[in-house]
Amino acid sequence: MKYRFENFGGIIAGDDPPMLAFVDRAFMREMSLGPSSRWDTDDESIGLLSAPTEVHIACTNACTARCPHCYMDSGDRDEAEMDTETFQHALKALARMGVFHVALGGGEALLRDDLFDLADCARDAGLVPNLTTSGLGLTERLATRMTVFGQVNVSLDGPGPLSAVFRGRDTSQQAERAIDLLLAAGVATGINCVLGRKNFDALDGLFAFAAAKGVNEIEVLRYKPTGRARDRYAACRTTFEQNVRLLPVLRDLSAACRLTAKIDCSFVPMLCWHDPPRELLTATATYGCEAGNVLVGVRSDGRVSGCSFLPPSDLSVFDLEATWTSTPQFDRWRTWPARACEPCKSCAYLDICKGGCHAVSAAVLGDGDRPDPDCPRVVEYARA
């Protein structure tokens, strides 16, 4: 078990089963952890953390798939892509900060010849490396080496021909082969599904496929208007009715298929529509926009952004350790709840949801400080 002290108590992470929980000071003491100098304050609220819990790193921008909806606009390598040594130094810097997980992706991470050297470095530094891949180029030999990752998720947006709904070509056989190879190698394997209006009603088929294969989770990712997907967002985003139905649909499919269903942080407004217990969301670290706090995005050249869907700043990953608590580039997102307008200002989930996805607001409304325009509460407020 790995843990980190925070002013409110601490964060505890485990591998078996995988979990990340925010706990209070009393719980930490019961676990014989503490006290800590970070408790030398009367403020026990969850605000700015001492470091991100997870960092999303694009190992490379290179990708041969060139999907039309790619939020990274992947295809060619970044000119200043970090070499092996630089990348390893970056991982060690994140470990010193107390980061728990690094999510390695791309582009297509498998196009880096040193991918397993990077994963080994992360493990040696105390980080849990996870991987997202299209499965393109995955071989039996490579699959057997992927036990170094805590989790490997294969991108698949629907069963069979529906896998082409956003990508423009049927990738189901490629994804299925990758899943079979990973499971045969004993790798914890899941599916990443980009969700929009065109494949929402195919979720039952995808869950049935996943359950039959024996994967351990499906993570549902919102179609976002960044990269090449920006011009297609209006036609591809989930509808109001689908957003309202999302939680009950995932709950029922998860129960029926006995399969873990996850959502990314941009779907948290849709979760909050159903008034879930606040204490449960807090304990499971379920938050909306936590750009520059709970998570950070890093491009393959080392430039840092609040999250992978926001433009990169002029900061480098090597700047984070020294400037984390005083990073002007992140203050806009960290302080947003204090500047929230209605209906977020009066919402009981303001401090959890934090206005939804500000990358969506920036692309759709031209102003990242506006509330997420697809949040059901925001839609209802506008209608009223």
Image: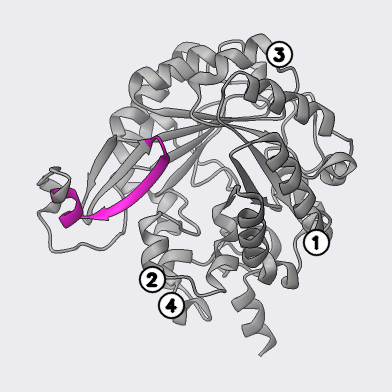
Q: Considering depth in this image, is 295 or 262 the residue closer to the camera?
A: 262
Instruction: Left or right? Give the position of 147 relative to 194.
Output: left
126 over 265 or under it: above or below: above
Q: Residue at x 72, y 39 (%)?
A: 212
Tell me which corner region of the image, top left, top right, bottom left or bottom right, holds residue 240.
bottom right
Q: What whole-number distance in Å separates the C-alpha atoms at marks 3 and 2?
A: 50 Å
Tell me, yes or no, whether the highlighted magenta stretch contains residue 27. Answer: yes
Disc 1 to disc 4, C-alpha distance = 29 Å
What is the CA distance from the residue labelled 2 to the residue labelled 4?
A: 14 Å
Mark sitting earlier along the chain (1/4) = 1
Q: Mark 4 highlights which residue? A: 348
Which stretch is magenta? Answer: 15-29
Marks 1/3 in contact by CB < 8 Å: the verdict is no
Q: Position of residue 351 (x, y in %)?
A: 40, 68
The secondary element bearing badge 4 is classed as: loop
Give the SS element for disc 2.
helix
Q: Residue 163 or 167: which is nearer the viewer?
A: 163
- Residue 245 in magenta stretch: no
Mark 2 or mark 4: which comes first in sequence? Answer: 2
Disc 1 crowd rating (10 Å Cα; few below 14, some 14-19, many 20+) is few
**Which sits earlier in the primary sequence, circle 1 or circle 3?**
3
Say which label, 2 or 1, has the lower sequence index.
1
The x, y position of residue 265, in whole percent, is: 54, 54
Which numbered marker is on residue 234? 1
Numbered label attached to residue 199: none
Q: Amino acid at mark 4?
A: Ala
Q: Earlier in the sequence, mark 3 or mark 2?
A: 3
Q: Answer yes or no: is residue 274 visible.
A: yes
Q: Nearer the viewer, mark 2 or mark 4?
A: 4
Give the residue at x 57% y 61%.
368
